[in-house]
Amino acid sequence: MPAGAEGDPGNRAAEGGAPAPPRRRRVLSPTTTRAEKARALRGLGALGGLAGVLVALMLLPTACTAGVGARDAAGWFGSEPVDLTTSGIPQRSTILAADGSKIATFFYQNRVDVPIERIAPVVRRAVLAIEDSRFYEHGAIDMQGTLRALASNLSSGQVTQGGSGITQQYVKNLLLTQADNAEEREAAKEVTAARKIRELRYAVAVEEKFGKDEILRRYLNIAYYGDGAYGVEAASRHYFSKHASELTLPEAALLAGIIRYPYAYDPIRHPGAARQRRDTVLERMAELGWLDRATADAARSRPIQLDVDNVRSGCVTSKAAFFCDYVQREILTNPVFGKTGKDREKLLKRGGLTIRTTMDERAQKAAQRAVDRHVPPKNSAHKAAAEAMVEPGTGEIKAMVVDRDLGPDRERGKTWINFAADASHGSSIGMQAGSTFKAFTLAAALDEGMPFGTRLMAPREFTPVGFRNCSGDRVGDPGASLRNAADGEGGKQFSIVTGTHHSVNTFFLALEKKVGLCDTVKMAERLGMRQANGKPLQQYPAFTLGFNPVSPLRLAAAYAAFGARGEYCEPIAIRSIRDASGRRLKVPGRDCERVIDEGVADAVNFVLQGVLTKGTARGMGIGRPAAGKTGTVDDFSAAWFAGYTPELAAAVWVGDPRGGYRYPMGSLCMDGTCYGAVFGATIPAPIWQQSMSGALAGTAASPFQRPPSLYFSKGSGEDQVKVPDVRGLKLDDAVARLRAAGFRTEVGEPVESGRYAKDTVAEMSPGPGPAEPGTTIRLRVSKGSAEPGEPGEGGPGPGGPGPGGTSTPSPPVTIPPLPGGPARPPG
């Protein structure tokens, strides 16, 4: 507010404003509290010290003459101190979701720096009236005001006016705020002539460097207003739930009055003292002629009305606590945000950052509802669940939830461990992922060109022999026999497709040996997998069965690469960061790489889609193209489901934080519901289904791409079933029966037939017999007997009826398959 501007309280006297009426003398009454007496004595003592400092300043040139001389002393006092910096005022940082909604706030001091235009003029007048009414008239040191305040306070028996001007108070607060340790803080608060002289010297430098408006703005933004609120904007939001630009006269006077003794005048703890102080401010404004008496009296008659908004620092009270914790740890551990941990913490808690994250509000809420519904935070079985959601093609983390509140583990329903993340971002050592790792063996096999129809014997027991790790060393010899304990059956052949759908352990051990353990491990590593503790994956024959401890986030990012047709992206949680001045800071950028060919990814997607329609997770679809894989860990110590669409991938873990092998889920009862043995499809898949449906609601669905033809060179890989004989049936009935059996149909030109009635099916190719589901059966309808003497009359022959009959090729008329594709074959 520049001097001379309209409403400038500093120039009211020059404009002919009414002179201040004589102040009423106030003495300490018999009812004055002990605290008030002590406060008054301290204030008087301080003013006595201030008077001594003023004498010292008057004598400064004389005192310095004996040394460097009066001229040098004056030069020292008037020069800008080399150690003075006006930057680095702590401001609170805010973490935002992708849509701009607030996730959490971090601060060393709860402060929001605002320009002078966003501070209501009535606030500025109120502060100036009670703290430094001649601010726009004097320099750094207001001798007249200081002596007047000393005389007024001595006569009234208590401190009603400050002895320091706004600039001096700003400097004191600046030095205190910039103190990095207890020693520096004590030095900034010590009551000595040396400190006062240093502050005055700094005040002179500040007045030289900044205009009055800027000094006032800085002061209003740095002052402490009690109850954890620093700066007028944070105080306004805290006490009144509004911006400083919206404050009314009584509210402005209340905040102005708090500055002198923030604890004593805290309106929450001491409403009576706060109101008296507010009224003192209003009275002072009236005395200065900055308010007419009627307005001041009306404001004094109003009670204090607070609308308190408590802002806490950190993630504990966040609506997305574990996602928030992940972002916090990313900033505190990533060198891109500072060379040392102390630098990074200072940036987060003092830098006034606006951190825009990747979190999708809808996905986060859907995931939290899903895990809390199926595994309540305080469930009777003490189980836990966690889920992470990642966007294919970007690596953006859309949601991250745990079915707990963030807090001390000793309290039921709370944990400090983020089970959804790696140890570096959540203290979790990870959990064994079970059969979800079979997807990496599948991808490695398809990457080597194995067709879907590749069939291997899956014995009831598999003894691992001859496996070598990536160093060429034999591992697992002689290994214990591995079985199909909880996943599928053995004792027969399976194709790549059916072995995956039924999650047959011994089939995948055989496939891993055929592909090579090292190639399987390298495929997982290409897809970003590593142990949750940051170490490389361990390499043993049971790798494909998922014994490595990993995090849901890593697994979700790997499966997201399948949805992105082979492009893997490192998970990221931060889109952008701006500092208090609006300057963009460097953040970890998108880190994506094509790690498998598109066709290979398409083939993986083709196989894993069947898990949701005819495999271990059948019935868990979400009404749009989706793929996934169940995972059940040995002895039912944990269960998983990882699944994805082209738009979103997610991985869900359910287990026991106390130790899955100590507290397995072989016969789980939880909150009155008994599940028996818990598989990946028992609890994790329903969580995935509910969360994905909620996260993707209202978004357009994208299809998966058809795999290259080479993968069909040995058929679709489905188990063969009998093609029903539909000859003699009406066309519609024949088509319906074939589709019900899992086959597709196309209709050729009608054929003359003396064996089958007109308008019934006379030919089918291939004919009745074993075939893979999905095979296209070509039908030809009879148009009746041929005219006498024409070929075809009288029995089978070229174009005649019978199994495998043929006719002259003609352009087929294709009947599209029923919605959802071929029906599941009977049995």
Image (tube, rainbow, N blue to C red):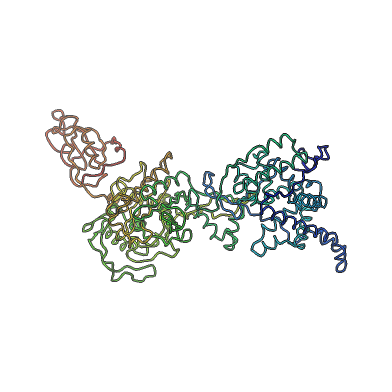
> Based on the displayed image, in which of its 4 quarters is residue 821 positioned?
top left
Residue at (75% x, 35% y) in the render: 292
Based on the displayed image, in which of its 4 quarters is residue 655 positioned? Answer: bottom left
Q: 756 or 688, which is in the foreground?
A: 688
Kindly tell me whether residue 353 is visible in this rendering. Answer: yes
In the picture provided, is 440 more to the left or to the right than 823?
Answer: right
Quadrant (top left, top right, bottom left, bottom right) of the N terminus: top right
Q: Residue at x 56, y 61 (%)?
A: 335
- Residue 728 percent across, percent down from the top left: 16, 34
Asked whether residue 234 is in view, the answer is no
Image coords of residue 605 (percent x, y): 36, 49
59, above or below 392, in the image: below
In the figure, is residue 191 to the left or right of 576? Answer: right
Please indicate whether residue 803 sits to the left or right of residue 42 in the image: left
Q: Nearer the viewer, residue 748 or 384?
A: 384
Residue 725 vertical position relative to residue 400 in the rendered view, above or below:
above
Q: Is residue 358 left or right of residue 809?
A: right
Q: Position of residue 612 (x, y in %)?
A: 32, 47
Q: How many marks?
A: 0
